[in-house]
Image (spheres, rainbow, N blue to C red):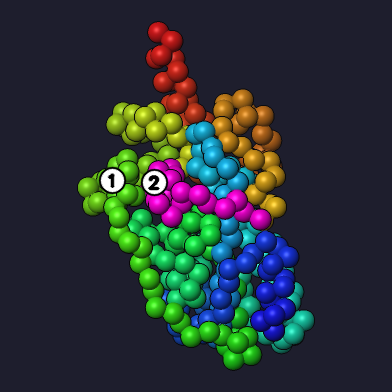
Amino acid sequence: MKTKLCRLLSEMGIEYFAVLDYQSCRVQAENIIERAGFSPRSVIVYLVPYYTGECVNISRYASSPDYHLAIREINAGIEELLRSEFPEANMRGYGDHSPISECHAALIGGLGIAGDNGLLINEKYGSYIFIGDMITDISPELLFAEEPKEIIRCEGCGACKRACPTGILSGKGQECLSAITQKKGELSEEEKSLMRKYNTAWGCDICQSSCPHNKNPKKTPVKFFYNDRIDNLTAEILSSMTKSEFEKRAFAWRGRKTVERNIEILNHTEDLCLK
């Protein structure tokens, strides 16, 4: 079974995965699995690398269409394989909104180390990865589940903490710059100034780009992330998007007005320079 799973994931560009006993995972939202209506016994956790190159004013993860669409496709493939082998089994795939801590599962699965910025760092793709998982009621033994591994932390060089624009990684700030770009409504002048200083219309990669483990990240083999890529989000690009096109972007969840506001904030910098 594990060989079949490895072959399937490899065909989709996924090379790092682990099979775990659900009991070894850290449950953080019991209500989610309760809604699924079955008692979980095993977990397949996997990494989805997304790095395709550098961006100008948008976080690397958001340069491609919404990554949840990619994870949904991967989970559909895993589910089809499992149902062919275990037709009576129950299962549910997740990505971000899982009943378990996906980062913790990936760590005890040996898929990477824990970074000081709270991100999982993979040996090949750095922290430019998403984590997906499939939770099932299939016996862990039938899926050849592994024993949980010891969690390894990064060296703690402090690069991410020193580079953090708001100081939140050092306990000095209230929220990260990425969170600021995702806030609705009017931003403070200080928040606008930070966005202009670091030229971000959405998200923040500064703690990642400063990490030594991300010095030479490998580009993703997952074809999904090379489609409709945006590296510099402009007002023209945004206005040209239909409602359907906009809704397929990772930055769509906060609404078009929030993104329009952010671009306008950056454009204000250009206006000041022209005066």
Residue 164: % across, % down:
32, 44
Left or right: residue 7 versus residue 32 is right
Residue that protrudes farthest toward the top in the picture: 275
Residue 41: % across, % down:
55, 86
Residue 204: % across, % down:
43, 43
The amino acid on which the numbered mark 1 sits, given as a three-letter code, is Arg
Residue closer to the observer: 143 or 255? 143
Q: Which residue is mark 2?
A: 210
| Residue at image point 72% right, 71% down | 8
Residue that protrudes farthest toward the right in the picture: 84
Left or right: residue 164 versus residue 145 is left
| Residue at image point 43% right, 10% down | 274
Q: To which quarter of the image does residue 165 belong?
A: top left
Q: CA distance from mark 2 to mark 1?
A: 9 Å
Q: Which residue is mark 1?
A: 162
User: Mark 2 or mark 1, which has the lower sequence index?
Assistant: 1
- Note whether 109 is above or below 13 in the view shown: below
| Residue at image point 56% right, 32% down | 232
Quadrant of image for the N terminus: bottom right
